[in-house]
């Protein structure tokens, strides 16, 4: 039964994604840190493996000053990342309020919390980091995409299911337009959104 569940669940998720007229990333499982030469695999591994990051929006309370906030996120069920960060936000918090006025946003995660940087400083180029820039959009709460996102978020962050209902938490997603990745010496790695969302098969991961 466990084998059946493991094989069928990814197909169900793919079906859910295909029913939406939105850009979705290829479901991908990457269990170990990829070779730094493989920018797409490294980027997807960073996003899928992490639990939290810093989400930056344009502040409506501070006259357009960039406002960074530590947030939880998920891009899919464990080991089944889509590449697209989803967030569970409330307008009681500035981040959601900002996004509803100005969707411009960026989201940064680091390899350091994963414990794979050893004794290296988080700013060491070999300790990978990625910033995704784009639009922070509210997802229709009745859509299949919102259902997919809630399942992904609750699977990684079970505490979310007990967050107060009267806070009206809603699903937001980052619609990615640009990618800034550092995973080795020599500056940022060139990586398009298409390459990130639909990486080629390699020896580090496999398409689900």
Image: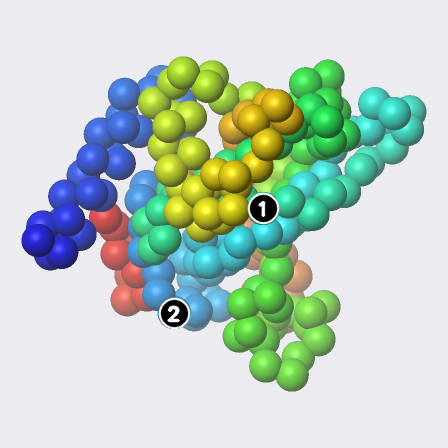
Q: Residue 133 sits in which quadrant?
A: top right
- SS under mark 1: strand
User: CB under 8 Å between callouts 1 and 2?
Assistant: no
Residue hosting label 2: 32
Q: Few, some or many C-alpha atoms within 10 Å of disc 1 (few <14, some 14-19, many ≥20)?
A: many
Return the x and y of residue 51 as percentages of the image width and height.
53, 54
- SS under mark 2: loop
Q: Is residue 151 left or right of residue 125?
A: left
Q: Few, some or many C-alpha atoms within 10 Å of disc 2 (few <14, some 14-19, many ≥20)?
A: few
Q: Name the one closer to the observer, 51 or 161.
A: 161
Relative to residue 207, is residue 148 depicted above or below?
above
Q: Name the one closer to the observer, 3 or 123.
A: 3
Return the x and y of residue 161 as percentages of the image width and height.
48, 38
In the image, what residue occupies the spot 52% across and 28% down? 171
Q: Name the one closer to the observer, 116 or 9.
A: 9
Q: Is residue 193 visible?
A: no
In the image, what residue occupies the spot 35% across and 60% down? 30
Q: Nearer the viewer, mark 1 or mark 2?
A: 1
Return the x and y of residue 90 as percentages of the image width and height.
65, 28
In the image, what residue occupies the spot 65% across and 83% down? 119
Give the Cα separation between the discs numbered 1 and 2.
22 Å
The residue furthest bottom is 119
Q: Is residue 171 left or right of residue 110?
A: left
Q: Is residue 11 visible?
A: yes
Q: Is residue 194 left or right of residue 132?
A: left
- Residue 72's tag is 1
Q: Along the polypeptide, which appears first: circle 1 or circle 2?
A: 2
In the image, what residue occupies the spot 27% across and 28% down? 16
Q: Is residue 94 left or right of residue 154?
A: right
Relative to residue 56, is residue 128 depicted above or below?
below
């Amino acid at each position: 039964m466990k084998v059946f569940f493991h094989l069928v669940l990814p197909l169900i998720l793919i079906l859910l994604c295909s029913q939406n007229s939105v850009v979705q990333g290829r479901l991908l499982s990457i269990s170990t840190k990829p070779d730094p030469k493989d920018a797409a695999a490294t980027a997807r591994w960073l996003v899928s493996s992490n639990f939290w990051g810093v989400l930056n929006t344009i502040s409506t309370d501070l006259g357009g000053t960039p406002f960074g906030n530590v947030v939880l996120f998920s891009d899919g069920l464990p080991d089944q990342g889509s590449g697209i960060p989803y967030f569970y936000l409330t307008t009681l918090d500035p981040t959601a309020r900002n996004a509803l006025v100005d969707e411009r946003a960026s989201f940064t995660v680091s390899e350091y919390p994963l414990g794979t940087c050893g004794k290296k400083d988080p700013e060491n180029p070999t300790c990978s980091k990625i910033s995704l820039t784009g639009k922070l959009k509210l997802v229709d709460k009745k859509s299949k995409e919102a259902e997919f996102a809630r399942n992904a978020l609750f699977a990684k962050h079970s505490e979310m299911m007990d967050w107060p209902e009267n806070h009206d938490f809603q699903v937001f997603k980052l619609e990615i337009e640009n990618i800034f990745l550092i995973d080795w010496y020599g500056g940022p790695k060139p990586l398009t959104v298409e390459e990130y969302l639909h990486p080629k098969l390699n020896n580090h991961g496999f398409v689900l």
